């Protein structure tokens, strides 16, 4: 979520990153130096926001996984699943919004004397921007699911096309 700003002082790891799950000494590494609970133990409000972000990120993964499976089913047989996909996309947009709002609040808010203001020492990392891109793509997908598709060449409606494809 956050990448250490070059030129900031007070760190042993000039290339480290803060993610939802913890601290990485090298951003491109898979290994974590410490968990976010340990890193924010002196900042209970920030720690709780990170925990909330973790929970809603996991919920989003499951929601989008279900949406993908139902979207494939919708392509091959059941057009009515579109409404379930629409509902799941709206739920996914809300859960992702909660994650990125929690990270923005954590970035700018001063949570007390023992907590640094993250914006003073860090920039947003690629993970934050990928989260925003996923959210924007989801918002863009919602109107697509709302559209009723007609086959203008045959002059048929969606219901007649569905009946013909199932026969």
Image (cartoon, grey):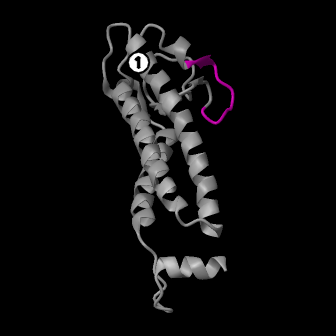
Q: Residue at x 49, y 32 (%)?
A: 56
Is residue 165 visible to the viewer in this orientation of the structure? Answer: yes
Q: Position of residue 26 (x, y in %)?
A: 62, 29
Quadrant of the drawing holding the C terminus: bottom right
Local crowd at mark 1 within 10 Å, few (<14), some, or many (≥20)?
many
Q: Start and end of the magenta stretch?
A: 27-35
Residue appearing at x 52%, y 28% in the figure: 55
In the rendered image, residue 107, in percent from the top left (x then y), is placed at 37, 28
| Magenta region includes residue 28 | yes
Q: Residue at x 52, y 63 (%)?
A: 80
Q: Quadrant of residue 76?
A: bottom right
Q: Is residue 137 above or below residue 154?
A: above
Q: Compared with residue 163, is residue 44 higher up or lower down, i.e. above or below? A: above
**Residue 120 pos. (x, y %):** 35, 25
Q: 159 or 128: which is nearer to us?
A: 159
Q: Nearer the viewer, residue 131 or 149?
A: 149
- Indicate the position of residue 9 as horizontal and vertical percent values: 44, 20
Give the left or right position of residue 85, taking residue 166 as reference.
left
State the predominant SS element of the stretch in magenta: loop
| Residue 17 sits in quarter | top right
Q: Look at the image and say whether residue 31 sits in the magenta stretch.
A: yes
Query: Residue 76 or 36: which is nearer the viewer?
Result: 76
Judged from the image, the secondary structure of the residue bearing numbered disc 1 is helix
Image side of residue 12 versus residue 105, left or right: right
Determine which residue is flagged by label 1. 46
- In the image, residue 75 sits, relative to residue 91, either above or below, namely below
């Amino acid at each position: 979520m956050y990448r250490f700003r070059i030129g900031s002082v007070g760190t042993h790891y000039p290339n480290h990153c803060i993610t939802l799950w913890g601290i990485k000494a090298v951003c491109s590494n898979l290994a974590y130096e410490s968990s976010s609970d340990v890193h924010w133990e002196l900042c209970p409000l920030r720690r709780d926001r990170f925990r909330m972000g973790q929970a809603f990120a996991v919920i989003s993964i499951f929601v989008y996984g279900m949406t993908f499976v139902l979207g494939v089913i919708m392509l091959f047989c059941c057009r009515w699943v579109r409404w379930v996909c629409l509902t799941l996309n709206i739920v996914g947009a809300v859960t992702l919004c909660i994650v990125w709002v929690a990270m923005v609040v954590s970035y700018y808010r001063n949570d007390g004397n023992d907590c640094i203001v993250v914006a003073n020492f860090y920039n947003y990392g690629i993970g934050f921007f990928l989260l925003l891109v996923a959210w924007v793509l989801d918002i863009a997908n919602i109107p697509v699911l709302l559209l009723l598709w007609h086959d203008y060449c045959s002059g048929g409606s969606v219901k007649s096309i569905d009946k013909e494809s199932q026969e």
